[in-house]
């Protein structure tokens, strides 16, 4: 499971944010906006005692134990059976895919979370490889909440038996070892742990990372990095879409203090991307209106077979004013269908303009 992460080029906490936000967005119900919250704080004495009752035997003796939680609402939660050996043709398998299984089921295709990448990042985020999952889902019998603890350690032997190093905490079960705590008991235990972001009338999921892998005094900085990453990664869903409001709400707090997020529509870097995205979206919606200068919008059409691959919108800068030939920053944002940025790429200088500038700056010859 740990090897699924492999090597990555970005900061770990940027990766953590992108993976958890992607999973939350994929779980959207579609009938309401998704709210995504990240909170970090030092556990109170009462919360620490409740955590020790839930996770007996876990390494929870560190002084001033801190936690990091990721909560999404407006999502369907971790539904389906709680046992991996229970199957149904139309049953969702979100719970067992995240809590029980490793790898890819052939029926799942290549959807987000296919290979357990997002699962591995949760355990890597904890110094003790331990997380607590609380989710509320709709079932055929009504709303149900589930609470379970998970840990990933190195494999080990005990009394001549080999163990994989995967652990669960919940209700003991003779068949599968542990089942999640459910019902009012799960609701009460979640509140005692401080998992209060998930209102009782909402479905969704809250993940608590125990002892985040950073110095305690730097947890606030880590959350600030994730807040900035979320804005750069998900701005297309944070702004209003035509007649519809934003599809995604973001909130980040550290020890109860809310971190302010930039407005993508006015941010110096993002506002042009927001405008470009609006023109691209109009093309997908069938609008034929030409964008105003200096904007250009072009469909990208492939052949063999002929099909629309995407839309590109770009803004042309006016020539620099006299005496100022500095090239303004130029980059392109690549987005995929859910409206999340895959990556940013620097745009190479225009070779025609570069040649012109070299002629302007060329010094006259002297004898």
Image (cartoon, rainbow, N blue to C red):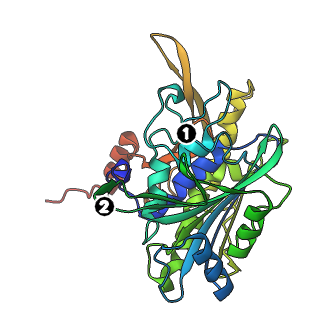
Q: What is the x, y in percent for residue 248?
A: 72, 52
> Would you place residue 184 above or below residue 144 in this image?
below
Which residue is at a point 61% across and 67% down the rendered structure image?
Answer: 69
Residue 84 shows which numbered tag?
A: 1
Comparing 133 with 245, the one in front is 133
Residue 315 in sight here: no
Query: Which quarter shows the C terminus?
Result: bottom left
Q: In this image, 162 relative to 40: left or right?
A: left
> Would you place residue 274 above or below residue 224 in this image?
above
Sooner in the amino-acid sequence: mark 2 or mark 1: 1
Task: Indicate the quadrant where residue 172 lies.
Answer: bottom right
Q: Secondary structure at mark 2?
A: strand
Tell me the CA gap for discs 2 and 1.
23 Å
Are the residues flagged by discs 2 and 1 in contact, CB closer than 8 Å? no
Q: What is the x, y in percent for residue 74?
A: 77, 50
Q: Secondary structure at mark 1?
A: loop
Which residue is at a point 49% across and 52% down the rendered structure image?
Answer: 119
Q: Which residue is mark 2?
A: 156
Q: What is the x, y in percent for residue 128?
A: 43, 71
Q: What is the x, y in percent for residue 217?
A: 50, 86
């Amino acid at each position: 499971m740990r090897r699924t992460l492999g090597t990555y080029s970005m900061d770990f906490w940027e990766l953590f944010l992108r993976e958890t936000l992607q999973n939350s967005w994929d779980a959207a119900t579609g009938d309401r906006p998704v709210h995504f919250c990240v909170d970090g704080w030092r556990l109170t004495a009462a919360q620490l005692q409740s955590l020790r009752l839930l996770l007996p035997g876990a390494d929870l003796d560190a002084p001033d134990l801190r936690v990091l939680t990721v909560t999404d609402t407006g999502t369907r939660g971790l539904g389906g059976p709680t046992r991996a050996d229970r199957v149904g043709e139309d049953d969702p398998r979100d719970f067992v895919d995240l809590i029980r299984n490793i790898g890819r089921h052939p029926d799942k295709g290549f959807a987000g979370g296919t290979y357990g990448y997002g699962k591995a990042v949760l355990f890597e985020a904890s110094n003790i490889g331990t997380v607590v999952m609380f989710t509320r889902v709709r079932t055929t019998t009504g709303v149900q909440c589930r609470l379970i603890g998970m840990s990933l350690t190195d494999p080990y032997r005990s009394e001549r038996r080999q163990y994989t190093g995967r652990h669960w905490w919940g209700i003991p079960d003779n068949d599968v070892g542990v089942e999640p705590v459910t019902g009012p008991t799960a609701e009460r235990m979640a509140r005692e742990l401080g998992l209060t972001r998930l209102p009782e009338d909402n479905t969704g999921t809250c993940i608590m990372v125990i002892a985040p892998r950073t110095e305690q005094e730097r947890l606030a900085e880590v959350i600030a990095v994730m807040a900035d990453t979320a804005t750069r990664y998900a701005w297309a869903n944070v702004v209003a879409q035509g007649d519809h409001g934003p599809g995604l709400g973001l909130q980040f707090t550290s020890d109860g203090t809310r971190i302010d997020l930039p407005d993508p529509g006015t941010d110096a870097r993002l506002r042009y991307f927001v405008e470009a995205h609006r023109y691209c979206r109009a093309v997908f919606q069938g609008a034929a209106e030409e964008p105003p200068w200096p904007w250009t919008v072009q469909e990208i059409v492939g052949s063999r077979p002929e099909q629309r691959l995407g839309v590109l919108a770009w803004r042309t800068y006016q020539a620099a004013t006299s005496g100022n030939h500095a090239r303004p920053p130029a980059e392109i944002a690549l987005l995929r269908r859910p409206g999340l940025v895959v990556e940013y790429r620097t745009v190479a200088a225009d070779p025609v303009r570069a040649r012109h500038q070299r002629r302007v700056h060329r010094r006259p010859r002297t004898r």
